[in-house]
Amino acid sequence: MDFSDTYSEWQPIPKWTRFLISLGYGWHRGGPQTRRIALISMPCDSAAAGLILLGAMIRDLEVKEANELDRHTMRLVEHARQYVEHCRRCTLPVCDPLLRGCGQISKVNGSFRSTKPQYQSVKYSITKMGKDPDCPIWLLPNFKYAGGNMCPLIEELGEFFIDGDSPSQLHFSTSGLSPELYEQLVPGTVILPDNLKRSYSALCLAGRAIGESATREMCASMRFRSGSKEHGLGELLTIQDWSVAKVSRVAFFNTRTEELDRKAATPHLVVADGDASFLKVVDHSEFQRSDVVGVIHRTMERDKLETVGIKMQPSQWYAADTDRLCELPPLPRGISVAILRRRTP
Amino acid sequence: MPTTASSVFDFIERHEACSIKRHEIASPGFGALRRSMGSIIRKLRESQDREANEISDQLRALLFTWLTSPVVFDTAIRDALRSFGEPEAFEARWDLRGEYKAALRAAETLILVENPIREQLRTAVRELRAQGRTFKIFCHRKGRPHFDSLFVPPLDAPLGDSVFLHSVRDYRETEPFGAIIKVGPLRSAGWGAAPDALISAPRFDTLVQIVWSGCGDEPGFGYDPVAPPSDVSLNPGNTPLPNDSALVNRATWTRDVTRSGEDPGADFGYTPEEDEFYSFREPNQPSEKRRATLVEIVGGDGVLYPPNSAILSFDPNPHANEPLALRLLGETLTAGMFVIQTLIGDVDFGGLLAAEGRCSRVWKQRLSEEMQINPEGICRILHHNGVTLLCLRSCVEHWCEPSTTVIHAPQQRKHFQILMEALAIDSGADSPVGAHGIPWWQRAWNEVRISRGEAIQAGVHGHEAIEDQALAILNGLLPEIRQKADSSPGFRLPIPPGHDLLGGFVFLSVLEVEEGFMVPEAELRVVRDLNSIEQWRLA
């Protein structure tokens, strides 16, 4: 397998890249009581955050429970209810839940899409909530060929997904992610075919403070090639809108706007790209139960380095996680790693 | 082609060991000058007199410039010292006991010798060139001419732009190379500052450090937030070093110190207490000042902001999601963008904008004529009447320069008044005093103040509602802003009629963002020339 960094010539995957992927792959989730905070210090700017997530994502592809099917129907119903009870009636030109006092976090668009390939261009508008718990949502498609006003059964809601999100599971006739590249990146991995057709939100990439495009460009510039197949890191991560993949197995947190790209359960692991992103994520209320891995480079001003350093000091709440440090693969020269673990009562 | 992470890792992998070749240089003349200036600065800092404090800050700025740059030992050093006044009068006024005279004497003796720092630097560069090694020089942008002046054809090839690194960003973007040259101690902020990454993330294998004896490196320089501060002399390092909370694998540093020259005046060499970088770390009266970050703009000017300020700014990148936004200094607001000053306040601002530069055109033309006819004469008059600035002549030359977004003029009101009186401009030639009810020089001064954004200080700038309104107005002006930004590094835009706000916006292109200043509150967010700003730099 070949690798190209910032559009340079193809070369075998270097040691530092393999280390970061294996660090992500080996990241064991200990549960909310043992939240971990790690800091990876790099000698230069890089797409290291994306590489760690790529490793973690490959690990998730092996895990049977790593999907959102259980929560999917509940999410659709919550979305429809918020739309019908709040957002549809809202008169504000720009969403402002505080001003409106609606108790929501942000507006929802009130439309679904179908996973069936023949209906992929159809948009289903939510019209009202159903009275029967077995048919909780009424939908109206924008094309007649897709039917009229309908109220799908609760088990049929699995075929729908929120417009703008990735489907929780692709239709059986649609092809999912291609496993070859992932398998070659972590030799010996056993990827479950079902997971290649399912979205998941337990992993999250927190982008650079300067904006999403900076992280996206950095990830896009790092490419992998196997035979005639060539993919950028951004595509492999399957972040919504970054790749042509129909499923998404990594959520994106926009550090500047402080918005997640989806409404989903709290991620298990957030990898923050850059010092500002790390500082924001580590204290963010949304991620207090998530493990956080910050990736910084040392070619920064002292003030910024010190601010990050203070955050990584052991305290009454967090202790050094020496066990985890000892489990890490050998460090390439130039990389430093610190890990803290929440103290258990 | 940008630097790739792989090329940096390749380099680090191949260079397990790095070395610091530190040349410590002593000189009797320069040592005497340092000690004399040090004791004057110390004495004046203890004074309760504000003017004494100002002079000590100016002397401190001079001393640090000489300690961190390969300056030529010529009459400029003596003249800079002499600009503070006649020896007898200066010593009598500030209760000195010969220190000023001693400093002048020492400066006089320096004229006869070459600066040994320059000799060593020349030797180092010639050696690196002879070995065919690629090298870089890390120095402050303002220090570059001192380096350039050493390498003049036909004896030496000039250094060229690619040799110089001036900021952490320059370092971040450079490809790995052979050696780096640094004049002065290794410090993370202030005078002679360099990035910690020189030690914590080297992209070279040899650091050639040329430093005056007694100037110690900052303890903990080479800081890595993951690992404990690295001591380059003790770090055993090419294997992972487990400690309580971190795993580290970094290059090994060795240090080779060469001492040359003698300074009989320093009995046992300098102690840390005598190291000027520790003794005079902060400018005077730190309690009255606050930390600030410099935004360097075109025309040799800069604006100081409180660190982590959210600043109204414009990103000219056509792909930027939000071209106009409040950005964090040094984080999301970087070089190449424009800071925007909102000039609101005096209700009559629209009128002032229309008359912008009218007075300045008159006095600048008059001053330029004087400088052509008799430059010494006008400088002498100004000095005699109380404009006691260092390098007065170059300051006057700066004031002659045409206005950009800022009108270059003396920083202090009393200096400006003296200048206007010295130029003896006939106010009636422009418009009678009575028409505006204020003297001509005062109107000219108001023009200068407004160009510097001082209306902000008096106005309601910073108020969220105002910034929101400003942002909304600016978004409506975006096509015009883009057009102007393409052609000019600084421009003004009046607020179109029909809005609640009166006034305009000044767009200033950001050349560099630099931390490490302590500044009086009143000097924040105001355009000042870089020479004045230097006095507030931390050591």
Image (cartoon, coloured by chain):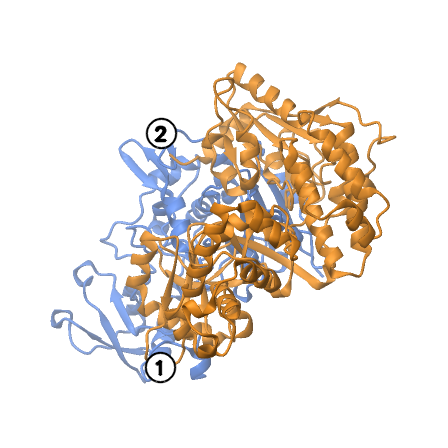
Q: Chain of mark 2?
A: A
The crowding category of the residue bearing disc 1, from other C-alpha atoms within 10 Å (few below 14, some 14 to 19, many at least 20), is few
Determine whether the residue tagged by mark 1 lies in a helix, strand or loop: loop
- Numbered disc in front, either 1 or 2: 1
**Frontmost residue, B494 versus A90:** B494
Q: Position of residue B524 (x, y in %)?
A: 58, 62
Whole-number angstrom distance, CA of label 1 to CA of label 2: 52 Å
Q: Colour of chain A?
A: blue
Q: Is residue A163 above or below residue A63?
A: below
Q: Chain of mark 1?
A: A
Query: What residue would you read off at disc 1?
Result: A92
Query: What residue would you read off at disc 2?
Result: A10
For residue A36, side relative to residue A133 (left or right): right
For residue A80, side relative to residue B4 (left or right): left
Q: Residue at x 20, y 61 (%)?
A: A120
**Frontmost residue, B160 versus A142:** B160
Determine whether the residue tagged by mark 2 lies in a helix, strand or loop: loop
Quarter of the picture holding the N terminus of chain A: top left
Q: Is residue B436 above or below residue A31?
A: below
Residue B375 in sight here: yes
